[in-house]
Each structure stands twice: as structure tokens, then as C-alpha cells.
Amino acid sequence: RSVPEAAMAAERPRSLFALSAAAVSRSMAALEQDVWALPGHLLRGLLPLLTVFHLERAEDAARRPGLSTQPIWRKLWDDVMKTRPPNSESITCWRKKFLETFFSNVLHGVLDVSSDWRLNDRHFSPLLHSSPHVSQLTLCNMLQGAVELTAKHNHKVLENLAGSLRILKFQHLLSCDQSIRRSLVLLLHRLIHHGSVSQVSMYSWPVPDTVLLVLILSMSAGFWRSGNALAYHGNLCELCREENKAQSQEGAEKGCNAEQEGGDGENQKGSPEEADAHTNSVLSGPRTPLRNPACEETSSEVPCDHTSIQGRCPLCCSSEQLSCHPVPRKTRRRLKPAVGRKRRCLRRSRGHYADPEDLYDFVFTVAREDNSGLLDKTRTTEGENTENWTSSSPGSPCTGHVGCKRRGPAGIFSLKAAHRFRSVSTLELFSIPLTGETCRTLSNLLSSWVSLENLVLSYNGLDANISCILSGLRALSSHPECRLRVLRVSDIFSHMPCMELVRCVLSALPQLHTLSVSFDLKNQLEGNRPEGNPSCSEAEIPESCLEVLEIRFPREPLHTAFLLPVLKASKSLQQLSLDSATLPCPQELGLLLEVLKECTPNLKKLSIHDVNLAEHQKEVLLLLQDPGLQEITFSFCRLFESSTAEFLSEIINTVKRNSSLKSLKLPGNRLGNHRLVALADIFSEDSSSSLCQLDVSSNCIKPDGLLEFTKKLEGHIQQRGGQIPFTHLRLFQNWLDQDAETAQEALRRLKAVCTVVNDSWDSSQAFADYISVM
């Protein structure tokens, strides 16, 4: 095999130590324990010559004499990955970063382990030994990674991932066949239902496969079938089997009748064939919104407002453990032939795989429209004689609004000893179009997804279907164990004015801590839509727990009157961000400041982005002297478009007197060189400022101006005895490439004073902006 001799070739003539270290590294299999006992100064020279296998095992030995392997892992990253990772400054463990990326690259076949001698060790199994370090994983395209991970030879790899993986991402997915979907089912079941995955994110799926999308959503919410559908290489999931055995023993001790008592998810007290037969008949019913069971791992009786024809909840009662209200005998007789066919099919297919239609039937609980007319008629006829069918309750996920059409009356059934699979706490959907049917399915999954803490819906083309999603969230909010705290919604077109949507969300979810609403454009189909609903300023919003509110307006006027009820209900608000709004009149910003002072005593951070403040100098100064604000952002607000030198001086003097302001961000305001140099006076000897962070990104700053700012700052530091609070300076997208030598000198001197964050940016892209400043 390859040896580390190539790594030492550049050190000719080699020392005796180098020769000895190379020999030891070749014999690590026999000498490992002796090597770990070496003194620190010898171990330090030997560590860079180890393969990945032994370097990973050397952590404890290196830590004892106070050595760090981080520089070695960083060099390994540079040599093997040959890229600069994003946010490299924030990486605290290069060992984890390397092995996690290494795992992904090997899994997807983009890294050849024979390409570097440090990766080529006969004791090193790439996937097996790197898997314990993987906390996030991305699966893409045809889900080849899912197939590989569920292969029999990777059983131990999958077990390791079940303990280490926290974030599972899907990107650029394509439609796939039944066998690949089956592998995905096994993977999700192990990693989510019996694992540690807490976040599922999906990205960039322009034409989503409905079957695949609903499958991922449903399993993320903790729902899936049991029995044959979760067979792993011919055997039932071991964890499910163990729990089933325990539940069966418990049921036997209590004298339970398995055909009368049912359950959900993993606990199967009756015959798997009978359960799957009944489930399949449920799943082949009409397209009906679903209401999920109570909560994760609890036993209770909870109303379920949306069911299929049998009165069961298909997504959650896929197995045989749900005990619902009595089902009309007439309905049972009508379904017997289908049950018989399913039983025969199950007997034939008992073996390595489940019924090929299991996945399809489960996913299409959204189900087929060609049968909906007949079955809806049946449901209506029999519903007249059954007290189990009721109209929609206030907590129902879908209530017949625009964009969310109900498919017949809602049913209510109770759950006895219902048990759900584990579900994730964060769901993110980016650039995935959601149809009306998918939104209805998601709404009903959300309605009982009590473990969900963070929901991000970004560029999903919701339009009117946003009401359907809100309906599901409203039902979730009524659950006593609801944990949802963060909601982020962004899209191209807004179906309703931003403030109206914010009001609706807070009315439905008063327990939210973070709400972000962002739209690019108004919906063109709405014509001359009123800019706001007059009732917004009058409607009572329940007192909320909101701490962070972010609103990106699609160039809508910012009416303080519409924002007022929201702020009044949000006494705990600490952070407010207003983006891309227009000010309908010169007095509007002043009114906003008065409202903020009156209604938000705890406000600490205020961000205003892409709002023209050129004619609002007085209000800007009032904000800068607010003693409650610790962070203020004016980004791309044209602050100095028509200002005078006196305005800049007033800003500097105001900040100097404000001892509570910690961070001032002024990106995109065309500061230029001379204004940047003037800002250094914030830290003069007579200043009482506590400013720690200054952001002057995208401000047409050139190297000579940065150098002059640095020199002036150094002078102030010297006058103050070398002590100032200033710690961070951000310089993204400035013209520092125009004189590389001067820029390097300025940055070198600045880094001796504070942490500088900048980038390599081609300033020729900003030529037009440069001309406007001149």
C-alpha cells in the first residue's frame, strides 16, 4: 500500500527522526499502543504522517500532552477537498468537518480514496469509520445514497447514522421507481422514527414527484405503515419487533382482545395481514384531508376532524392499533371484497418486500379523484344515520376557505392507547411548488405535528393555499403540547397584504417566538387591491409571545396603523426587521417611532432595509440615540444620498454619546472613503460609545480610504491607552481589489486591532455605482 514517503520527499536530506517516523507510520497496526504512549514532542512530529484511520484514533493520545490535531485536519481538507468551505471562520472542529464531507463525497462517488495515501488504509472503511462524525447529510437526484445506505453490507453504517445524524437534506430530487422509494422508506424509518434526525430540509425541486414528496413529509411527521411495509431484507424492523413484542405481552397481561384494541405506528397487537388489509382499503378511498392523532408517544382520546370513509385516520392508523368509533355495518360489508383481495396478495408477497402498492396507496391518502364522487355520496348517505359524522370544528385543519376545498363532512373518532412514531422538530421546504392537494396533505400533517418547533416555507407558490396551511397550524396551536415557535414564510407573490397575513398568523399562533414574512411582488391577478384591510388596525389580536418579527414588503406602503395592533399584542418583541417598504407620507416614520417607543419597551434590535430614508434624517438620529436599542441596521437606505456634512457629524456625535448601542450596520449607503474616515471619530478619546461591531459593506470603499481609516483608528486607540470596545469590522463587497498592496497593509494593521471579515470581490461589477458616487 501507499506510504507517507511522498509527503517527506520535499525534506531532503531527511533527518533520522523523519526516517523513523515514516517507518513507524507504516507499522501503525502493530505499534499503535506504543505510539500513543510517546512523549508529546515526538508525537507532534508523527501525527502528520498518519493515515486518516489512525489520525482519527489519535485524538485522546494527542489531547493528553496538550496537542491539537486541528491543523492536520485543516491541511488534510485543503489537500483532499481543494475548496474553501463556506463560513470557514466559524468552523470549530476540522476533524468533524473533514470526516462529514468525506462521508458525503464517498457516498455519492465524487471522491476516490486511492487519490491520497492518507485515505488509503486497509483498516479504514470510508463510510463505516466516518459515519459517527456525520451530523448532517444531503441526498440528491435519484436517491442513490439512500439505496447504498440501506444495503445489507452497510447495516452498521446506518446504525451509526441513527445515533449521529441530526439534519437530513434532500436536494434536486428526481422521480424514482418503487424499489428506490422502498429504500428511502427504510432509511427514513431508521433515521427519523428510530433515530436522532430532528430536521428535514428539501431544496430546489421545480417539478416535485407527489408520491415522493408526500412520502417524505408524512414520515417526517412520524407516520408510516407497519408490518410488511417496513421489512428490512426480509425481516421486520428489529426495533419495531422488540416494541411489538413488549406491547403484545402487556396486552396479554391485561387480557386485551387484539381485534378490538388497535394502535398506531410501531405497536402491532393484531394480525399484520388483517391490519394491512384494512389499511389498504382505507388508503384507496377518496381524496380526503387527514387529521392526525394526538401527540408523540402519548395515550389519549382526541377528536380527529378529517377521516376517510371508515372513520380512521389513514396516515396514523396504517397499522392495526387505532380503535375508532363504531363503523356502520353497511360500510363494512361493502368493503369486504377489497379486504379479501388484499389478504391474498399479502400471503403471496410475504418475503423480502412489501406489496408494491403499499407506498403508492399510503401516499395517495390524498387519494384518487375518480372514486371520490361515489364514495362521497356513500359517506353522505350513511352519515345521516351516524352520529360519528360531524361538521367541521373550530380546530379543523381545513375549513372550506379559498384554496382549501373540503371533500365531504369531517369525522370524529377517538384514539385508545395510540402510539406514534418519532417525528422531526424542524421542516424546511425551499423552492418546491406545492399544489392544492399537497397543501391539504401538509395542512393535515401539521394539524397534529406537536413536536414541530420550526417551519420554513420558502418559494412554494402557495398563493391562496396559504390559508390552508394556516388552518392546519391553527389546529396545531389548539393542542396543549404544541411546540411551534418559529414560522418563516417567503414567496414571489403575496396573496394578501403583508400586515394582514401577520395579523392572521399571530391570531392563529400566539405562542410563536419568531415570525418572518417575506414577498417579492404583489399578486398581479388581484388588480388594484387595497393596500391594507381597514380591519387590521381594529382587530383584536391575543397577547403573543413574539420576540422576533421580520417583514419584507412587496413594495407595499408601511401603514403604522396596520402595524399598531401587532405591536400592541407583542410586548415581548425584541427584534424588528422592516424590508422593502415604502413610506406613504413624510410623517409615517415618525409615527412608527412613537408606536415603537410606546408598545415595545423590550426592543433591542431594529433593522430597516431598502427603505428610502434620504429625507428622514431627524428620525434616523432619534433612532441612533434610543437608549433601549443595542443593534441598529440601516442597509441600502440611501442615508447620504442628499445629506450634508453636518448630518454625518450629527450621526457620529449621537453614536459617541450612546453607551447602549453595541452594533451599527450601514451596508449599501454609499459612504465612500471620506465618510468612512470620519466614522473613526466614534472611538475618539471623548467618546462614551460602547460600539463593538461596525458593518460598512458595499459602501464604495477603496484601499487608500481604508488605510486612512486604520491610521486614524490607531491614533484614537493610542490616546485611550490601547483600550476600545471595538471588536468586529465587516467589509464585504468594497473596492479593495483596486490596489492590492495598500489593501493588504490596511487589513494587516486592522487585524491587529479587531476581527475583520471581508471577501474577494470584483469591483468592476460596481462601476455604475462608482460613477454615481463621484
Image: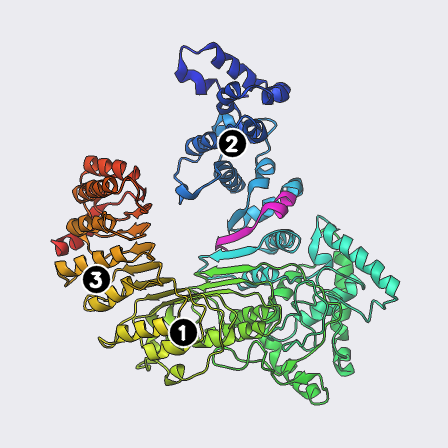
**Disc 1 to disc 2, how far (Cα)?**
57 Å
Q: Amino acid at mark 2?
A: Val
Residue positioned 59% across, 18% down in the render: 27
Residue 719 x/y as whole percent: 23, 41
Look at the picture and state if 480 lies above or below 383: above
Which of these two is toward me, 31 or 221? 31
Choose the circle earlier in sequence order: 3 or 1: 1
Q: Which residue is mark 2?
A: 113
Secondary-structure class at tag 1: helix
Decide: few, some or many residues near mark 1? Use Cα within 10 Å; few <14, some 14-19, many ≥20. many
Residue 220 x/y as whole percent: 59, 59
Which of these two is toward me, 291 or 694? 694
Choose the circle earlier in sequence order: 1 or 2: 2
Residue positioned 37% across, 76% down in the render: 563
**Disc 3 to disc 1, how far (Cα)?**
27 Å
Q: Is residue 237 visible?
A: no
Nearer to us of marks 1 and 2 is: 1
Q: Which residue is mark 3?
A: 638
Residue 653 x/y as whole percent: 21, 57
Q: Which residue is mark 1?
A: 567
Left or right of 9, for residue 102 = right
Secondary-structure class at tag 2: helix
| Magenta-colored span | 158-174
Q: Look at the numbered discs 3 and 1 and tell me whether their residues touch, using CB distance below 8 Å.
A: no
Q: Quadrant of the N terminus?
A: top right
* Disc on res. 213: none
Q: Name the residue at the left extreme.
A: 774
